[in-house]
Image: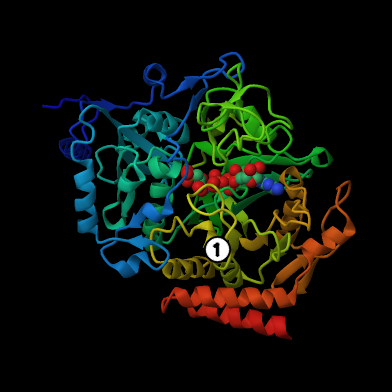
């Protein structure tokens, strides 16, 4: 017999929990209320079991290191399924499985899986308290590490239960680390039931079900039916010296610059500019009465890529990591201070690597390339005062982009909304260590949503077209690429804080004053419109990253044509038209 105590009776929630308990047969059940005491208790239990390692409590107070199973350090897209009733609703970019069959397979794996474990019930709220756009999820998990992360990443515990009340309007998540074997690892989504079942992984997007599973895959499927957008986007406020505040959102594929742009600190030459962070990974957009698109960040923390983060590249992230943070798969010094490649120019002596083994230079990477930090958004000095606004913030420009060593220029602007959707839909970007598989392979990653769109990607494109076309003042759409390489394999553009120079041009365009040249692919800044004062870049290099190479773009067009064809009959005609318009512009 299993007993539990809750202050508020929610019969739907109790039934869900008791059903999952009958299946997984836990040793005991722990309802998370989100309190400080609860967290302290869980942390000290995890330290005892070796799940967390205490870091230097002077330099990194209340911060801990976690080492994942070496087989479980990134999302596994090949094991991730959309189990809609109809295969055609999942579409060609998702793995599909028939819901009942998939559930039967998963139920087998979940049967008795928690026999010697505690089952945690984690209520979480996605979005500001009191916002009509916020959503409640209940994640059941046997991983206390997941609980500790959800506590930072979401508004967790009683706050979520209060928002839910007696309603049955919550997304259900069932998670177990199982035996961590990739052979028995599945991340299944049942959009019609608003249900997620994940087993066999304790890592990131596979296990923190609030994030990619709920806030993107399930939410995008809901949004498609309700006239809103759930996107893999950062949200940043940019205030000019004369007090003009502009919100920009941006979709770049995993490990391709969202957290860094969201936390950007203006460089010395832009010290009169102010940036403010709303979100670094996920944005939910609704149409405002003013015919603009308004965005909330459903999350409350960052699960950020550690490597490359340092005081120069991302001072706001470094500041927010000073305390109350969890580090996953980073290296550690003899003093118990976390370290990763790019944190300092030279590695400290006697590091312990992410496997927990002594490390010497030449031994490969000390931190895993997809090692991460978990930290609260409230700890970044750049946190926006509008973070908890229940209507969100009005977005004036949306950016698409990705890692691309060649071809795509530093920045270009779409001609109009539908052309902007075309640009987003055709993004090609190099794969990264955020997902298992080959790194550096160019693939189409539409709107940075290829791994996260919970329904047919062509229907998703139609949805995008519909949203903006029904608004008199939708955001302007831009494409950016911070990742062009020279012949020595070095980045040409300095990136990071200096990306503000590109954002300034974008704001100028939005306000109708930035100068631009019309090219076949879109508007590009005139040489004098982009501020390059005090920048360490040659004019040859600048020309290189701003030029449009028609021959190379005609080749790219063929790749796009193949991609569109692979998506089948549902691909909206508007996008085929955009492709043929691009072709005629490139050929004329
Ligand atoms: P996810 O959390 O996986 O969705 O990633 P993300 O899009 O938030 O990427 P993030 O900002 O964490 O950056 C990933 C990597 O790219 C880090 O190693 C950064 O240091 C690097 N990076 C980010 N911005 C820039 C840039 O402007 N230029 C260069 N060269 N590298 C960058
Ligand atoms: C991503 O891969 O886009 C991430 C990290 O933001 S994860 O939480 O693993 O999805
Ligand atoms: Mn992401």
What colouring style does the render use? rainbow
**Residue 574 pos. (x, y %):** 53, 78
- Image quadrant assignment for residue 556: bottom right
Q: Is residue 347 visible?
A: yes
Viewer-proximal residue, 250 or 340? 340
Of all residues, the one furthest to the top in this rendering is: 58
The residue located at (51%, 52%) in the rendering is 232
- Image quadrant assignment for residue 125: top left
**Residue 217 pos. (x, y %):** 40, 54
> Compared with residue 316, is residue 39 higher up or lower down, i.e. above or below?
above
Q: How many marks?
A: 1
The residue located at (72%, 55%) in the rendering is 507
**Residue 146 pos. (x, y %):** 39, 33
Viewer-proximal residue, 279 or 195? 195
How packed is label 1: few (under 14 Cα within 10 Å), some, or many (20 or more)? some
What residue is pinned by disc 1? 443
Viewer-proximal residue, 232 or 75? 75
Q: Is residue 2 left or right of residue 332?
A: left
> Compared with residue 525, is residue 167 higher up or lower down, i.e. above or below?
above
> Compared with residue 23, is residue 195 higher up or lower down, i.e. above or below?
below
- Image quadrant assignment for residue 17: top left
Q: Is residue 195 left or right of residue 337?
A: left
> Compared with residue 295, is residue 96 higher up or lower down, i.e. above or below?
below
Q: Is residue 68 left or right of residue 173?
A: right
Note whether ligand 2 is within 8 Å of mark 1.
no
The residue located at (21%, 32%) in the rendering is 9
**Residue 362 pos. (x, y %):** 66, 35
Q: Is residue 297 visible?
A: no
The quadrant in which the C terminus is found is bottom right
The quadrant in which the N terminus is found is top left
Dot 1 lies on which element?
Answer: strand
The residue located at (48%, 68%) in the rendering is 461
């Amino acid at each position: 017999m299993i007993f539990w105590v809750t202050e508020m009776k929610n019969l739907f929630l109790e039934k869900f929990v008791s059903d999952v308990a009958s299946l997984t047969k836990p040793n005991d059940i722990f309802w998370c209320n989100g309190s400080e005491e609860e967290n302290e208790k869980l942390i000290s239990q995890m330290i005892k079991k070796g799940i967390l390692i205490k870091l230097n409590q002077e330099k990194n107070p209340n911060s801990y290191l976690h080492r994942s199973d070496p087989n479980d350090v990134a999302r596994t897209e090949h094991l991730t399924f959309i189990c809609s009733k109809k295969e055609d609703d999942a579409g060609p970019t998702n793995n599909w499985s028939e819901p009942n069959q998939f559930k039967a397979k998963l139920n087998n794996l979940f049967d008795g899986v928690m026999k010697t474990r505690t089952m945690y019930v984690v209520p979480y709220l996605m979005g500001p308290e009191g916002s009509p756009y916020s959503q409640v999820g209940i994640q059941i998990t046997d991983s206390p590490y997941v609980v500790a992360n959800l506590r930072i990443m979401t508004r967790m515990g009683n706050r979520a239960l209060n928002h839910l009340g007696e309603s049955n309007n919550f997304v259900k998540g069932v998670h177990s680390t199982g035996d961590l074997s990739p052979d028995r690892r599945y991340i299944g989504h049942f959009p019609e039931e608003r249900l997620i079942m994940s087993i066999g992984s304790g890592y990131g997007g596979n296990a923190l079900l609030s994030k990619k599973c709920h806030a993107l895959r399930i939410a995008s499927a809901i949004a498609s039916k309700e006239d809103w957008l759930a996107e893999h986007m950062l949200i940043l406020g940019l205030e000019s010296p004369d007090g003009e505040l502009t919100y920009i959102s941006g979709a770049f594929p995993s490990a391709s610059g969202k957290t860094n742009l969201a936390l950007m600190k203006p460089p010395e030459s832009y010290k009169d500019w102010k940036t403010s962070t709303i979100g670094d990974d996920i944005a939910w957009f609704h149409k405002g009465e003013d015919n603009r698109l308004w965005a909330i960040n459903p999350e409350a923390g960052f699960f950020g890529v550690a490597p490359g983060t340092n005081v120069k590249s991302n001072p706001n992230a470094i500041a927010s990591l000073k305390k109350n943070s969890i580090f996953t798969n980073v290296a550690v010094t003899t003093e118990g201070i976390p370290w990763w490649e790019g944190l300092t120019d030279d590695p400290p002596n006697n590091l312990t690597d992410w496997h927990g083994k002594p490390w010497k230079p030449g031994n490969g990477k000390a931190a895993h390339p997809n090692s991460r930090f978990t930290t609260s958004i409230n700890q970044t000095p750049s946190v926006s005062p509008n973070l908890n606004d229940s209507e969100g913030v009005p977005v004036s420009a949306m950016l698409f982009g990705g890692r691309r060593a060649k071809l795509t220029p530093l920045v270009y602007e779409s001609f109009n909304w539908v052309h902007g959707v075309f640009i987003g839909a055709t993004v090609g970007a190099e794969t990264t260590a955020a997902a298992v598989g080959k790194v550096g392979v160019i693939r189409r990653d539409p709107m940075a949503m290829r791994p996260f769109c919970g329904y047919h990607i062509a229907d998703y494109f139609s949805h995008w077209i519909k949203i903006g076309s029904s608004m008199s003042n939708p955001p302007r759409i831009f494409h950016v690429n911070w990742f062009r390489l020279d012949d020595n394999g070095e980045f040409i553009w300095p990136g990071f804080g200096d990306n503000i120079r590109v954002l300034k041009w974008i704001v100028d365009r939005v306000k109708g004053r930035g100068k631009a040249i019309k090219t076949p692919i879109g508007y590009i800044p005139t040489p004098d419109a982009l501020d390059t004062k005090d920048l360490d870049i040659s004019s040859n290099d600048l020309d290189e990253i701003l030029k449009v190479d028609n021959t190379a773009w005609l080749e790219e067009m063929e790749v796009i044509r193949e991609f569109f064809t692979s998506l089948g009959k549902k691909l909206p005609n508007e996008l085929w038209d955009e492709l043929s318009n691009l072709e005629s512009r490139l050929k004329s």
